[in-house]
Image (cartoon, coloured by chain):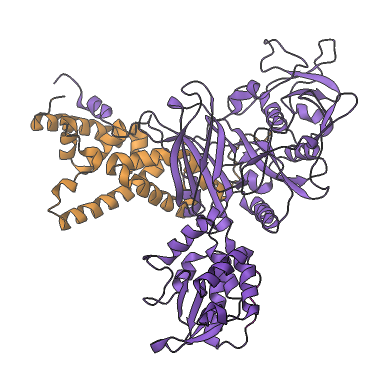
Amino acid sequence: MTLYRLETAAASPEDRFRAVFSRHYEAVYRYAARRLGRDDAADAASEAFTVAWRKVQRIPDEPGTLPWLYAVTRNVVSNMERARRRRQRLAARASTAGDPPTMTADTGVIAALADLRAEDREILRLAAWEGLRPAEIGEVIGCSPNAAAIRLYRARRRLEEAMNETGGTP
Amino acid sequence: MSRDPFEILEEQNPMPDDRTVYTPMDTAEKIMGRPHRRPWPGWALAGAVAAAVLIAGGAWLWWLGGDGGIEVAGSSTVPIAPESTTTSESGVVTTATTAPAGEPIDTVIYLYLDSTSDPEACPTLVPVHRTIAADAPMENTLAALLAGPTEDEAVSVPALSSAIPQGTRLLDIVVNHGIATIDLSAEFLGKAVTGYSTGSGTLYFYPEETARSCEDAAGYPLGQVVFTLTRLPNIDSVVFLVEGEAAGFVANPDLPVIVGSPLARDDFEYLLPAVMIETPVYGGSAGNPVVVQGTANVFEAVVSLALVDNDGLILWEGTTMASCGTGCRGDFEIAIPYDLTQARLGAVIAWEASAMDGSQTNVREHPVWLSASSSTDTCSGALAGNLLEQPDLPVAVADMREQIWQAAVVCDYDSLADLTSPDLFTYSFGGSGDPAAYWAQLEADGEEPMRFLAETLNLSFATTDAGDLGTAYVWPSAFAYPTWADVPQADRDMLATLYGQAAIGDWELFGSFIGYRIGITEDGEWIYYVAGD
């Protein structure tokens, strides 16, 4: 009976990459879509997995695989956001093209989130949207679980303050 | 503030986890810098050979069809000849072959295909193309089934697999009144509990301990056999024997067992994907138009379909309705035309559009060998004989003549258009635009402009004065004569073979030749291919 493909320690880099891709593509795509919008998400996911393939020997085993992929995707997304901002500066007139599609819902909490520092924003999104626990957040942003927990706590406080300042009503 | 902003943020997730995202495994292969590892080499070769045989006029039939029909390559389904079955005195019906022994024929076996989007999902049945010797189609099909996936198929993404334990042998098979009684060797029981007896020597299948909870794992090998056999003509259900003894199976020892009763496709619906493509089969050939037929249990019975080539270019995309949906399985069938200048690999993809966001879910993809468009498929140029030597032509003219001929015999309109002399070329009186489109349309209308083009180049030529362009070489020479009366009898006879006597009469009446003529200047400029006055 050969119904089930099980990962084995002896798997080739290709097989390992396929397994990682197959298991985590969705999550990586979603991560990118939440930050860049769906139009650019596939490109970002592809780019992230391209990096992952180059570093296939260094991809951590489960359960560390996804946080590691998030960290890679985070860099890719940052690059793409920078490129996007450059384009926006060049095409300043097209002011409405500025916001990522997913951010156009101008609710109080999203506006407040946009006012936070990039790191706070990312920690909050990782916790709220990717559903990561502090230990996993630490792996993504490169700090200890303890530090991640503290930063998340502070970020939540600052989100609350920003909501009050922007006058957002939940 | 009444609520925690963090909770609100959680609710504002722009891409919630319950939205399905299709995992494009092709992308993984591209990233690794290799073509998508599909099980193509083996079957692609088989498809090419089959196509070549057909083009060469091979009259053997593609043996299998979906519902008691035979697929002819590149064509639709034709009814099975009644002679394909014989009935012995005992009333036992066995399938017989219509193809000579030794000639390979196509058949279909059912394997399991992994889900492309959900690695945790149970694999589901898929009809897979095989080529077998024609002497004993049923036995050879079963042998192919028992052999399982090829090495390529087993490692491709998604992988094909078989639940039938290796080493299982076919001991006997008898078909009687639509019921196939198949006797398999003990290996078929695999790790199932054996030796259990109710007093009548009955063997039982028990579910294996599986790595994940696929429903009724014991049914997996049985489903493959039932689907494979019931795709053959005259078989509706299957009774299993193991080493000559009646074999029942239970998914759960507490469930009642029906021993020796025939099992049909309906008993194994749980082994099917939400969208099941029955034809074209996985790794098989698709006609043009391709008839995509299958069953689906999808939201509001809408089955989404796409046809793509090997580069991922979408040749066709659309939807069709299944006969039943949202909770019940219905049949669907759609003929999809597509435009391809030559046969190549591609894929038929069928899926259910997510009711939530329209994304692709329950995707089923069959790699298939696509055929060239019907206009090319039946290119009239292919009917022309070989290009004859005409040694008196200048080199530039001879080169152009040969290039035109080579493109005409394969209806390569684009190359022909490239060969035409810009601004000077005449292909139609009154028509304007693209000669390639014009010829393609004529071919589609059955006018055979490509056959006339190729064959006219084999007629005798003449030279005429083309003004500033110098001397023009024209085919046929009949066009160079001032009146029809001047055309020698030998030329008339040649034209009569090509156009028929009726046309000769018309030209006689009209006073000159006004059929297809081709003009190439002494410098090798192709300046016309036109008919009419």
The residue drawn where x is 55% and y is 62% is: B448
Name the side, left or right, on which A49 lies relative to B143: left
Query: Residue B268 occupies which quadrant of the picture?
Result: top right
Residue B517 sits above or below residue B468 on the image: above
Can residue B157 be seen at all in this image of the molecule?
no
Q: Can you give x and y, in whole percent of width and height, for residue A15 in the image?
A: 56, 47
Residue A107 sits above or below residue B394 on the image: above
Query: Residue B230 occupies which quadrant of the picture?
Result: top right
Name the one closer to the observer, B265 or A148. B265
Q: Can you give x and y, in whole percent of width and height, for residue B479 in the image?
A: 52, 78
Which lettered chain is shown in orange?
A
The residue drawn where x is 59% and y is 24% is: B270
Q: Can you give x and y, in whole percent of width and height, for residue B22 in the image?
A: 44, 39
All told, the count of numbered labels is 0
Q: Examine the residues drawn in magenta and state their main secondary structure.
A: loop
Which lettered chain is shown in purple?
B
User: Which of the image's four quarters has the C terminus of chain B?
Assistant: bottom left
Name the one closer to the observer, A77 or B281. B281
Residue B297 sits above or below residue B488 on the image: above
User: Which of the image's four quarters has the N terminus of chain B?
Assistant: top left
Residue range corresponding to the magenta coloring = B385-390
Q: Can you give x and y, in whole percent of width and height, for residue A142 in the image?
A: 33, 44
Name the one closer to the observer, B99 or B198. B99
Can residue B451 be seen at all in this image of the molecule?
yes
Instruction: Tell me, yes or no, whether the highlighted magenta stretch contains residue B389.
Output: yes
Query: Residue A125 occupies which quadrant of the picture?
Result: top left
The residue drawn where x is 60% and y is 22% is: B215
Instruction: Tell me, yes or no, whether the highlighted magenta stretch contains residue B164.
Output: no
